[in-house]
Image (tube, rainbow, N blue to C red):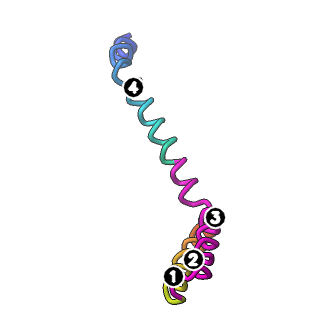
Amino acid sequence: MLGRIAALLALPFVGPLRATAWVAGQLVDAAEKEAFDPARVEAALLALERRLEAGEITEDQFEAAEAEQLELLAVIRARRQR
């Protein structure tokens, strides 16, 4: 009986903590889905190519940025295979 009373008394504190933890978990999940979305990386690669063709960046800048994006894409694909 004492355990039930303690649980009821703790409810105003535990409930909001659990809700906050749930919301935080949802935010982390959404951020991870966005960060590890291969479509985002593919769009970045296309944008880089357009910038190169428009003369906004040099070939060296393009290659460095492309290598970064391809590495990120490899990480995303490896993560999805787990």
Give the residue displayed 40% in from the left and 13% down from the top.
4
Q: Disc 2 marks which amino acid?
A: Arg
Q: Mark 4 points at which residue?
A: 16
In x, y percent, where is residue 48? 58, 75
Q: Is residue 82 at all visible to an observer of this figure? A: no
Q: Do the residues labelled 4 and 3 touch (CB within 8 Å)?
A: no
The chief SS type of the magenta part is helix
Res. 38 mark: 3
Q: Mark 1 points at which residue?
A: 57
54 or 80: nearer the viewer: 54
35 or 62: nearer the viewer: 62
- Does label 4 or label 3 sit earlier along the sequence? 4
- Does label 4 or label 2 sit earlier along the sequence? 4
- Does label 3 or label 2 sit earlier along the sequence? 3
In x, y percent, where is residue 25? 48, 42
Q: Do the residues labelled 1 and 2 touch (CB within 8 Å)?
A: yes
- Does label 1 or label 2 sit earlier along the sequence? 2
In x, y percent, where is residue 39? 65, 62
